[in-house]
Image (cartoon, rainbow, N blue to C red):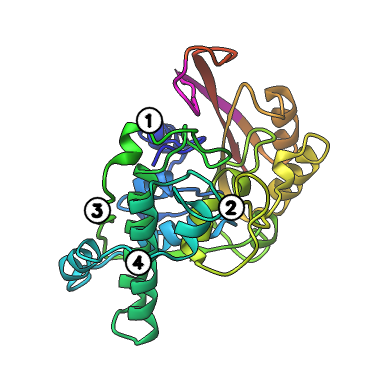
Amino acid sequence: MNYIGSKNKLSSWIVEEVENAVATPLFQLTFCDLFAGTGIVGRTFKPLVKKVFANDVEFYSFVLLKNYIENHQEISSVEKYITALNNLAGKKGFIAEEYGENGKAERLFFSEENAKKIDACRQQIECWKTSEEISEELYYFLLASLLESADKVANTASVYGAFLKKIKTSAAKPLVIQPAEFIKTSQQNQVFQEDANQLIQQIEGDILYLDPPYNARQYGANYHLLTTIAKYDTFAPKGKTGLREYYRSNYCKKREVAAEFEDLIKQAKFSYIFLSYNNEGLMPPEQIKAIMSKYGKYSLATKNYQRFKADKTENRNHKANQTIEYLHILEK
């Protein structure tokens, strides 16, 4: 999934820096990814540590984490159910009507065929769950597979803050449900869907990894349609893009982010804290250093990398092609 702030290209560097900072071998330690998103960092550490805690307040993320992090053992009959989903005929439902081509709402997030296929698949997955034909593990595996596959044929530049005026080439391709494969491990892991500053009061461990939003873009708005597919609930979509009510993070608010961040650091009952943040974030590096230094030994690692672009058009103005990723390190 092409995701704002994804650490896919940085995950090996993060592991390296964590290993350099932490004296104890990783397999003896617990790891918490508090703003997990699609779970890339948690997935990377999953086979390396004793246990992973992963959290994100967004429901689409919770679904992905339930599969990629919490699922850890072989699930039977996966191919049977993936094949069954791919063999389904499309069915006009909420997604097709509100977000599909030729739907009543005239939103062009998906082709007509793909929107109907999403409806059919989502309804079938819920039917299997309601009838107790499938386990919770398989339920989240299938939901994650649907979300990942639907995202690949979405008619957007990348995020769901807008749809394109015409169906692009990749969005015209038929939706094919690909299995959302997860790493199999012996240990059990735990996933949450909580406000980070609330959850931090209830958990403790060894390594705390923080990757909060950097700027004013709210993830709940940018990925609202993934939550709508995941929840498949009934509501009145608002505006041109069919927004639903969504959580608004204080980490996206310039006046509140520093106080929210310091509260989190202060409450954290973890031996090591690692914060990913870039040079274009709401909090400057000096402010982060000042806050973290109050609570222990502070250090910093940096890396240049290609910035995220929500589209690839040449006429969009970006501050720079590259950005600097900061990994702020605190030993409490």
Q: Which mark is residue 9?
A: 1
The residue type indicated by label 1 comes to: Lys
Q: Residues within 10 Å of mark 2 (few under 14, many from 20)?
A: many
- Between 292 and 232, the one nearer to me in the picture: 232
38 vs 186: above or below: above
Instruction: Verify CB contact (< 8 Å) between mark 3 and mark 1.
Output: no
248 vs 155: above or below: below
Instruction: Verify CB contact (< 8 Å) between mark 4 and mark 3.
Output: no
Quarter of the rendering occupied by the N terminus: top left
Q: Secondary structure at mark 4?
A: helix
Q: On the image, which quarter does residue 216 sit in?
A: top right
Instruction: Verify CB contact (< 8 Å) between mark 1 and mark 2.
Output: no
Q: Residues within 10 Å of mark 1 (few under 14, many from 20)?
A: few
| Nearest to viewer (mark 1 / mark 2) | 1
Q: Which mark is residue 178?
A: 3
**Distance from label 3 to label 1 (Cα)?**
22 Å
Q: Secondary structure at mark 3?
A: loop
Lower sequence index among marks 4 and 3: 4
**Distance from label 2 to label 3 (Cα)?**
37 Å
Q: Which mark is residue 120?
A: 4
Residue lying furthest bottom: 131
| Percent x, y of residue 71 | 33, 65
